Image: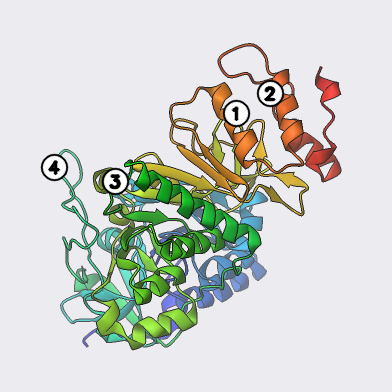
């Protein structure tokens, strides 16, 4: 290998205040881990000396603590996009210590190419192997790596021996042409390969290689419980009924599923349902449940952007690559999350809502309307373009003090026009073909927690006359009373009569 080898500290020393960095990876899978830890130390030293030191950051999605956590605690982030899930970074964003622009994940690579956003002049990529002519073989996640590698002036490679070189062949790297030259993206089934197994970069841009041997920083998901298992069962039963009604083909359709314990429970319930045949997955994040379903034969193939797996599951995949490489494909996020492909393949899209309202609008991002949780992620890429768009949520949070279904969402990420099905542990609200009043009645009857049903029925009666019977003075009263008392159940509608 003819590239210069250097330490993570040396590499960090070549990054300057106001630089903008683009990273490989998607979630904590495939993200670099060494250079940013040293960059955090450098920022802290600069701040102690009274000198400014902040960088802009683009990633595929969330990252591990070695990027978002380290740099947030060092107050070294000027801006961040498009998605995050780190508690320290979340605090930094909500206190305006760093700027954050939430973005549909499929849009970031093309926005960078279009020049809509400041250029990432540095790319840091995690690789399992690299050739002298600049072929970079990624690890367990892709994200925006192809685009930032092409646009950046300088590239650093973290060559991570934890990920086997035998991974070669699991990636499908493809960048669409920009308008007015773009053609259709030729993915017609989840298993179609359309690109190369590597990123081709200009070798002259590779500043140095940092050798590491570090596992992914994927945290464990909360185990399934009675509520999430019931949500999963409701989803599986609903899809089974759709098949019996002839609205889903007998061969089934590819599935897109969000990330987290609810998503794992949903996929597990689908695999256990005898009426649902073996199916394919076309999604962004491939989780443990997909690997389990592959082993049992319930999932035939999975295309995604990352292997966001527990350490145990990832090591099982790496130990049996000959089996799994025939069933897995990792793509850049503008392909894994492409609205064009979602519409063509007819995806069944299943995502988790932070909050829903009785008319079918979804809040995926903001707690009580103001505090950013994580971001919109890929849910918008999929839900509006899916064959069938499903949102799931537990009906309550904080031991019943919060109703996840409210009169009006405190922040809108997905409007009533994109949401077809809402499912909680209490039941299913099929919203297709319903007017606003009909949607409200069905959601309250089928999905709302029993403690909140009478409160929401009473609110609906308070609604002002019109197509959508909202009461503008009371629409956010659930949130207002929660901010004042810590319990939405303490609402008194008499104040609004």
Camera-near label (1 vs 4) is 1
x and y, in percent, of residue 41 in the image: 58, 76
**Residue at x-position 51% and y-position 73%:** 218
Q: Are dots 1 and 4 in contact, CB under 8 Å?
A: no
- The circle on residue 440 is 1
- The circle on residue 181 is 4
**Residue at x-position 51% and y-position 53%:** 79
Q: Is residue 134 visible to the viewer in this orientation of the structure? A: yes
Does residue 223 sit above or below 382 in this rendering? below
- The circle on residue 346 is 3
x and y, in percent, of residue 389 in the image: 42, 43
Q: Which of marks 2 and 3 is nearer the N terminus?
A: 3
Which one is in front, 132 or 415?
Answer: 415
Does residue 203 sit above or below 106 in this rendering? below
Q: Badge 2 is on which residue?
A: 460
Q: In which quarter of the image is the C terminus?
A: top right
**Residue at x-position 33% and y-position 72%:** 297
x and y, in percent, of residue 4 in the image: 29, 85
Which one is in front, 116 or 456?
Answer: 456
């Amino acid at each position: 290998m003819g590239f210069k080898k250097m330490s993570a500290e040396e590499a960090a020393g070549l990054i300057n205040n106001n630089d903008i960095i683009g990273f490989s990876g998607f979630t904590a899978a495939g993200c670099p881990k060494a250079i940013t830890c040293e960059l955090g130390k450098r920022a802290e030293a600069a701040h102690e000396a009274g000198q400014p030191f902040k960088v802009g950051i683009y990633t595929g999605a969330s990252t591990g603590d070695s990027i978002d956590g380290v740099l947030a605690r060092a107050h070294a982030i000027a801006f961040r996009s498009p998605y995050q899930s780190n508690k320290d970074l979340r605090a930094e964003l909500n206190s305006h210590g760093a700027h954050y622009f939430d973005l549909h994940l499929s849009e970031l690579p093309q926005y960078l190419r279009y020049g809509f956003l400041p250029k990432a002049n540095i790319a840091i990529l995690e690789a399992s192997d690299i050739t002298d002519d600049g072929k970079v073989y990624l690890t367990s996640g892709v994200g925006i790596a192809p685009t930032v590698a092409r646009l950046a002036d300088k590239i650093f490679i973290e060559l991570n021996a934890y990920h086997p070189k035998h991974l070669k062949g699991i990636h499908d790297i493809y960048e669409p042409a920009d308008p007015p030259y773009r053609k259709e993206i030729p993915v017609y089934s989840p298993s179609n390969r359309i690109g190369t197994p590597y990123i081709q970069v200009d070798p002259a841009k590779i500043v140095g290689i940092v050798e590491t041997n570090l596992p992914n920083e994927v945290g464990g998901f909360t185990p399934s419980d009675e509520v999430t298992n019931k949500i999963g069962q409701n989803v599986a039963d609903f899809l089974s009924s759709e098949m019996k009604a002839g609205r889903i083909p007998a061969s089934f359709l590819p599935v897109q599923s969000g990330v987290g314990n609810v998503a794992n429970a949903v996929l597990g319930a689908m695999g256990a349902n005898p009426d649902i045949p073996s199916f394919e997955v076309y999604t962004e994040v491939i989780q443990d449940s997909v690997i389990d379903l592959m082993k049992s034969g319930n999932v035939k193939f999975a295309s995604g952007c990352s292997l966001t797996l527990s350490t145990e599951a990832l090591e099982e995949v790496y130990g049996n690559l000959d089996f799994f490489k025939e069933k897995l494909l990792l793509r850049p996020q503008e392909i894994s999350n492409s609205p064009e492909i979602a519409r063509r393949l007819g995806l069944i899209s299943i995502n988790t809502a932070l909050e829903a309202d009785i008319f079918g609008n979804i809040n995926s991002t903001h707690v009580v309307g103001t505090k950013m949780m994580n971001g919109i992620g890929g849910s918008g890429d999929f839900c509006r373009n899916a064959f069938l768009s499903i949102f799931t949520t537990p009906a309550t949070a904080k031991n019943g003090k919060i109703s996840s279904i409210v009169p009006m969402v405190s922040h809108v990420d997905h409007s009533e026009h994109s949401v077809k099905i809402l499912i909680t542990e209490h039941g299913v609200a099929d919203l297709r073909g319903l007017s606003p009043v009909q949607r409200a009645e069905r959601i309250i009857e089928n999905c709302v927690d029993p403690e909140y049903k009478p409160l929401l029925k009473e609110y609906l009666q308070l609604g002002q006359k019109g197509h959508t019977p909202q009461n503008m003075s009371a629409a956010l009263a659930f949130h207002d009373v929660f901010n004042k008392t810590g319990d939405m159940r303490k609402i008194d509608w008499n104040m609004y009569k």
